[in-house]
């Protein structure tokens, strides 16, 4: 039987916007196909071995939590980067997405050093970017839609060679100006979208599962599921984002 | 801060003393009263538009009218429990013979407060009421406190709620602090001792502070309590330790690093027995005496509301005899575990709006024996919170663990499909789930699928609750809130 080890980073601190929904989507959709899932919660100060991690999930947190997390992760950035170069999967939402870049300036003008995994940085902006959002996600060709909700004060700018996760159909995206949303580097996906994102976008959930299986050279075939509820929620959210 | 507050108050006083202020006030009252009449004729509650319009005409309206109340006003704020707490306080004040006004519809923004004042004054702005009890939204709290200059403030708790409006939990705490600072010196402040984010808040002025808390041993359960957002000491940021946790971050906490710990409450709940009807029989210990009472409200979270009301009444020097009499007859407020009955089927409507509050409702549902039908109505209008991701922080898994006891589970509202997906991932079978976009039809469906003597639970968000309640009123069940006394 195939098995995926999901490391859930700081579940008590990075869980602001229904991030439990993302974890639940990954676990359920794996288990419905008979794929085993081990969830390993990682808490601040824990001794972790990224060599056994297939998929690292990082949720959103408040500024105060994020600072603590950045501090705790500092010593581990080398390990994580090495795993990323080997194609380990990371899915990071909102505050954690910001931490994947080079730095992040908080609403109180504090500069938080990032993990330097993706070529991006985050400045503070005037007002928060809040609301339903929909993007054309270029992980697929032709692109497919992703729907979610964004709520961020930071404005994220991507380096010239970094691919965005998609282009904005409705909403603000990375910075409210360049129409991009999220970022993709190797098997690392960062995004501002929550809602929760994965339950309503089963295509992305399955994409992450496939990549995690491939990372350990396991069978990547995913049996088709009945996604009629998920797809209706997706369509309903797409419509709401446009209204 | 102090200077800023005084400036704000001076601005109010000056504006209210201006030559045209009197005329503006009367004009605003007339227009407000006419709009209340018209909106009610349209079958609406008349709580938003009249107040909003009147405040545009006379921005100091609330300050002026509240100043005419003989005993001033009491403001109740916090994430959960403010409606119930405010209505319990009103019940006690009524019993004590005070003429008390109250924004009972839960319209708790600045304009809702203004509408209530307009409705209860005469056409020339006379107030013959003694006191106002206003529940106030956390975001509106600093502004309303500055304008009402209340003689008392009650703060229930702080949880994650409507982050699309507030941004982060830290900012809710900052709003509460700002409101406490804007209140007049010498007033009384009733604070939940078991909430570590509140007990550390001190007003910059000298005030009369009362705290309340639970002293019970409760059995642990499987809830995950994702809404437990206060993890660190508010004074030194070290991780807090708990001797007891009642729910979320509410309990007996202390910081192992600095001296910060739960203050010894002035009003304590020292014993509790759940009766056959599910109501609470409780013993409350005050500094000078004990009270025994039976409160017809369900759930642990309501015990906090009861303690807050008792502390407030004691700060107002009302006798324990009157408090007991009032609380023994307390009815659930507007949409808070409100009961309706049709064809020997009991309907219980309980507002859900954030993870911690919703989890408390689920705990109460779990305690109901027998078959249950469930209708969950999720809207994402501004008053509901436009971000529905909080549904994923609610422990619906606890309901799925007893899924055989549900005759059916129906999702409705603007976000019905999101809710259906939430149920599916919680562990319900797809065949058990129904989606009905129209809430009136969803309620009827729920009733059809409930056998006599069984229960139908309806869990709506705020605007869905207003819609469903109106529908129930049209069916001849319950009465519109503006006709309640």
Image (spheres, coloured by chain):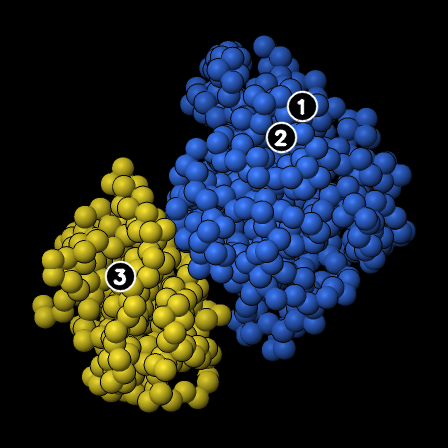
Chain colours: A yellow, B blue
- Give B452 or A202, whichever is nearer the viewer: B452
Q: Circle 3 is placed at which residue position?
A: A203
Q: Are marks 1 and 2 in contact (CB under 8 Å)?
A: yes
Q: Is residue A147 visible?
A: yes
Chain of the residue under label 1: B
Q: Are marks 3 and 1 in contact (CB under 8 Å)?
A: no
Comes first in the chain, label 1 or label 2 = 2
Q: Is residue B314 above or below residue B362?
A: above
Q: Circle 2 is placed at which residue position?
A: B104
Q: Secondary structure at mark 1?
A: loop
At which x and y percent is residue B42?
48, 15
Chain of the residue under label 3: A
Q: Residue at x 59, y 44 (%)?
A: B373
Residue B216: quadrant of the picture: bottom right
Dots 1 and 2 on the same chain = yes
Q: Secondary structure at mark 3?
A: helix
- Give B298 or B105, whichever is nearer the viewer: B298
User: Disc number at residue B484?
Assistant: 1
């Amino acid at each position: 039987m195939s098995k995926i080890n999901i490391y859930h980073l700081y579940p008590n601190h990075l869980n602001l916007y229904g991030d439990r929904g993302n974890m639940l989507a990954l676990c359920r959709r794996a288990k419905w196909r008979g794929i085993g899932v081990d969830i390993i919660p990682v808490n601040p100060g824990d001794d972790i071995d990224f060599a056994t991690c297939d998929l690292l999930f990082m949720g959103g947190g408040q500024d105060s939590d994020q600072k603590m997390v950045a501090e705790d992760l500092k010593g581990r950035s080398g390990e994580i980067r090495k795993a990323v170069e080997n194609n380990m999967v990371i899915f990071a939402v909102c505050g954690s997405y910001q931490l994947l870049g080079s730095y992040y300036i908080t609403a109180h003008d504090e500069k938080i050093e990032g993990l330097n995994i993706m070529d991006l940085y985050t400045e503070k902006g005037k007002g928060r970017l809040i609301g339903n959002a929909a993007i054309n996600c270029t992980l697929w060709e032709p692109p497919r839609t992703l729907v979610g909700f964004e709520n961020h004060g930071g404005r994220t700018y991507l380096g010239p060679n970094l691919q965005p996760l998609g282009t904005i159909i409705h909403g603000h995206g990375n910075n409210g100006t360049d129409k991009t949303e999220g970022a993709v580097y190797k098997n690392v996906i960062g995004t501002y979208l929550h809602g929760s994102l994965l339950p309503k976008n089963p295509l992305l959930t399955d994409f992450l599962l496939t990549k995690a299986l491939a990372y350990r050279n396991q069978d990547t075939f995913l049996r088709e599921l009945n996604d009629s509820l998920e797809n209706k929620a997706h369509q309903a959210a797409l419509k709401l984002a446009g209204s | 801060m102090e200077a800023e507050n005084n400036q704000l108050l001076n601005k109010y006083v000056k504006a209210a003393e201006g030559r045209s202020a009197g005329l503006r006030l009367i004009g605003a009252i007339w227009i407000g009263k006419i709009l209340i009449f018209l909106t009610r004729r349209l079958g609406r509650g008349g709580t938003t538009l009249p107040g909003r319009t009147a405040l545009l005409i006379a921005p100091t309206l609330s300050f002026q009218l509240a100043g005419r109340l003989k005993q001033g006003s009491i403001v109740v704020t916090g994430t959960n429990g403010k409606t119930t707490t405010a209505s319990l306080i009103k019940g006690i004040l009524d019993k004590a013979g005070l003429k008390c006004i109250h924004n009972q519809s839960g319209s708790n923004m600045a304009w809702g407060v203004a509408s209530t004042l307009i409705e209860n004054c005469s056409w020339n702005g006379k107030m013959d009421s003694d006191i106002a009890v206003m529940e106030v939204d956390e975001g509106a709290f600093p502004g309303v406190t500055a304008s009402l200059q209340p003689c008392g403030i009650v703060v229930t708790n702080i949880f994650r709620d409507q982050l699309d409006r507030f941004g982060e939990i830290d900012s809710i705490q900052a709003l509460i602090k700002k409101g406490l600072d804007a209140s007049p010196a010498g007033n009384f402040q009733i604070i939940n001792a078991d909430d570590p984010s509140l007990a550390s808040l001190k007003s910059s002025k000298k005030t009369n502070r009362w705290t309340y808390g639970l002293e019970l041993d409760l059995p642990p359960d499987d809830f995950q309590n994702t809404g437990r957002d206060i993890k660190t000491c508010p004074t030194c940021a070290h991780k807090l330790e708990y001797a007891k946790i009642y729910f979320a971050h509410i309990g007996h906490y202390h910081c192992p690093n600095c001296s910060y710990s739960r203050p010894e409450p002035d009003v304590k709940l020292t014993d509790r027995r759940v009766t056959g009807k599910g109501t609470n029989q409780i013993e409350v210990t005050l500094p000078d005496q004990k009270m025994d009472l039976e409160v017809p409200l369900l759930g642990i979270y309501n015990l906090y509301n009861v303690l807050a009301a008792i502390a407030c009444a004691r700060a107002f020097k009302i006798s324990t005899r009157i408090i007991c009499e009032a609380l023994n007859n307390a009815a659930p407020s507007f949409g808070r575990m409100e009961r309706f009955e049709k064809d020997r089927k009991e309907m219980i409507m309980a507002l859900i709006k954030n993870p911690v509050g919703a989890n408390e409702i689920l705990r109460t549902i779990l305690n109901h024996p027998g078959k249950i039908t469930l209708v969950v109505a999720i809207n994402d209008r501004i008053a509901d919170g436009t971000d529905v991701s909080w549904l994923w922080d609610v422990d619906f898994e606890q309901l799925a663990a007893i899924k055989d006891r549900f005759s059916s589970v129906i999702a409705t509202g603007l976000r019905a499909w999101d809710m259906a997906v939430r149920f599916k991932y919680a562990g319900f079978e797809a065949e058990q789930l129904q989606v009905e976009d129209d809430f009136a039809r969803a309620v009827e469906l729920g009733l059809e699928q409930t056998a006599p003597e069984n229960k139908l639970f309806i869990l709506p968000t705020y605007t869905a609750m207003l819609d469903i309640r109106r529908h129930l009123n049209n069916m001849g069940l319950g009465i519109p809130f503006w006709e309640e006394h």
